[in-house]
Image: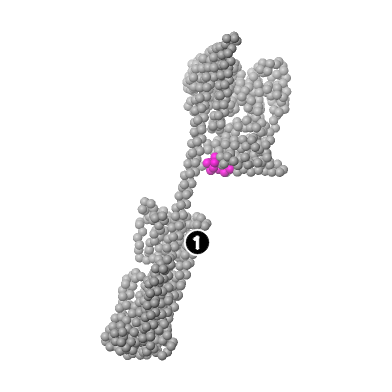
Amino acid sequence: MRVVIVEDQGLLLDALADGLTARDVEVVGRARDRDEALGVIDASAPDVALLDIRLPPTYTDEGLGIAEQVRARYPDIGLLVLSSYAEVAYAERLLSLEEESRAVGYLLKERVGELAELVGALRRVASGEVLIDSYIIDRLMKRRRTRDPLATLTPHERRILALVAEGRSNLGIAQVLGCQISTVEKHLTVVTEKLGLPASGDRHRRQLNVRVLAVLAFLRGTPPVQT
Amino acid sequence: MRSDGPRRWPAAALAAGTVMLFALAATVLSRQTATGRWFIDWPLRLWGVAAVGPGVVVWLRAASPRLGQLMVAAAGTYYLNYLRGSEQPVVFAVGFCLAYLWVGLVAHLVLTWPVGRITDRAQRVMVPLCYAAPVGSQVVRYLVDRPRPPWGFGIPQPNTLAAQAGSALFALLALITVVILVRRWAVASRLRRRPGAPVWGAVVLACLLGVGVSLASMLSPTLWLEIPLLVVALCAGLFLVPAVYGLQRQRAGWARRGLADVALGLWVHGDPTTVDPPRLQQALADAVGDPTLRLIYHLADESYVDIAGRVVAPPQPSAGRALSSVFRRGRLFALIEHDEALGDEGGVAEATIAAAGLAIENAHLYATLQAHIEQIRNSRLRLATAAFEERRRIQRDLHDGAQQRLFAVLVLLDMARHQLGGDGESIDLPRRTLQRAHEGLQDAIQALRELTENIYPVALAEHGLAHAVESMADLSAVPLTVDIDRRRWRPEVENAAYFVIAEGLTNVARHAGATRAGVTVSAAAGYLTVEVVDDGRGNARPLAGHGLSGLQDRVAVVGGTLSVGPATGTDSGPVRGTRLVARLPLEE
């Protein structure tokens, strides 16, 4: 897997490059700001770009700007964005890069401390999956609602819903929970019925991503996306 | 002025006493000059004594003692004519020559009335003439006719040529005086006419009576016309002076009351009309009855401006106009240009100046205060903005500096952990230590992130109020409905609104015992209205402490208002809950 790292802080950039290399990730380029990033990506044709969201000159959302340009130019390059803040707005912007989101991920920056997980996330994004940091999903799940439909879910069902929102497949969920995939599917049918989410199987990646968006939209309190 | 009374009274008392004694001596001396008719004798003998009273009062109380002094002097010299009753040749000669000196004094009085000073050319010519004529004509008569005592009112004397010439001169001067008075009335300012047409008429009548007396004495040797006319003229003069004086006092009182109103407007009511220079000038002019009154402000740079703020030439005194200076705290604040006659009315000019001084100073203070308030408001906003910018800078430094380096160390720790690999006994201890370091650093990064988020709400600046409040709502302890206008506002307003909501929600979580809460932010009529409502116990008191005053400060910085009250209208039941409302102006 060929990766380009875009990070303005030199020490972190080097550490990340070394750490990923040590874990058999091919770091084909590194950049510290937007222009450099676009040049490096042009030159190196990576599978995934690992982007810090806050970059010079304004330190706000330059990373997302790079993601938009890269997606427009090279639709096949996966985009994993790292952010210090759990900003739902940024996650949504990333998910709305295309009509049907794919190959994007939004993680909290402190996930760099678990390089094994980061490598896993890079691989999933490279293979076209969508993933959202569990911290954001947690926050959304915990949001108190006047009439809370989540209250009708059992703790087990809530856990499964959160994992769906993070972008995991049924198989992935079964692995996380240590149970049969059929059990996961059974629970999911109940959850989608209870919450009135669009039903979807796990046959296609496209449906998986639609599922993420639907759950996210639901959690944020807006009507689910209709497909 | 009243305040001058104590200094004037010894001189006035001495003069009055002298006149009384002299009157007594002179009339006793001239007992033989009596006509034998009491209604002629007594008015004539007592006129001078009677004139002393009003004369002393005017001397003591009027703005200028001149008129009073002239009256007392006229009263005293009046008794010189009784010396003509003396058999002693020298006393008789003095009495004869100076018998009509008092007429000169009365003429002086009438000609300079109501000011008491010689101000124009007519007066400068006429006043000496009026002294010279009665004395000169008597001296000539004394030398030509060689009169012999006893002599006096009511004692028939040969109507010689010299006597006729003297009477004719009297009549002529009296006529001229009448003409001067009438002309002066015609051209006088409103202020000068203040004693009123009847009084002017009476003065003119007294003069005409004088003319009559003179003509009678010139044409007819009989005393039957002359003496009663003289008595009437003297009595008229006697009653006229106090009447005029009283009227003048009354008018001055009115003016002072008007000025008191102006001053009261300043002190008691803080009346803004007295702060506005054109209105102040009008109020002063109305109060003192001088429509020509003008206010001229003196600026620190020695220039003068009128009430409209136009620069004017340094004012100079001119005919009929006087300038009064208004000093406050030792500095020339303003000049009041007014009719000269204002100075004649007891204390009116001084009272005007005092009132104007107060008003001008008040206006000055008001303007200064307004300027200071504006400055303070601006500097407070600048300080608040600067403080917020400083927080932003600290937040960035922590985030983009320290935190990023900590991330790098975290990666390195993870790498070390990975490099150690394996499960062998020998590396178990360092592995565990590394694991602890890794976890500790993660905790530190988490703590730092929470700290930086509290220092400055990044979501607010980058995504606006709606988004920042929704993020905040994720962590709310009670179910929350959020309805926020998604537009962006100026940063100061967004900041204030954000902190109102944050403080409100903190309070809901801590004290309200609420089961739900709502946040609404809406923009209408130039204001952003921020509302935090809960259905809790409705005890807003915890907010009354530091939290509320802190919020009030934040809201006041952007010119907004904050109110706390029960959240009525949520149900039809009993009053419950708390409603925190901030109204923030959208425009500066």
Pinpoint residue B274: horizontal percent, then vertical percent.
48, 57
- Of B43 and A102, nearer the camera is B43
Residue B314 sits above or below residue A31 on the image: below
- Examine the rendering and report whether any part of residue B351 can be seen: yes
Q: Residue at x 63, y 27 (%)?
A: A139
Residue beneath label 1, please? B261
Q: Chain of mark 1?
A: B
Density class for disc 1 (Cα within 10 Å; few <14, some 14-19, many ≥20) is: some
- Give the residue displayed 65% in from the left and 41% down from the top: B539
Residue at the spot x=49%, y=25% of the render? B401
Q: Is residue A66 visible?
A: no
In this view, the residue in front, B2 or A52, is: B2
Residue A186 coordinates in the image, percent (x, y): 73, 19
| Residue B558 shown in magenta | yes
- Residue pictured at 42% horizontal, 60% vertical: B353
Give the residues in magenta: B553-562
Q: Nearer the viewer, residue B531 or B182?
A: B531
In terms of secondary structure, where does tag 1 sit? helix
**Residue A16 against residue B224 in the figure, above or below:** above
B117 to the left or right of B406: left
Magenta stretch holds residue A66: no
Task: Estimate the x, y position of residue B428 in percent, counting from the top left.
Answer: 59, 12
- The quarter holding residue B121 reads bottom left
Picture quarter with the C terminus of chain A: top right
Amino acid under disc 1: Asp
Residue B215 in the image: state x and y as whole percent.
36, 85
- Relative vertical location of residue B302 with respect to residue B217 in this rendering, above or below: above
Q: Quadrant of the N terminus of chain A?
A: top right
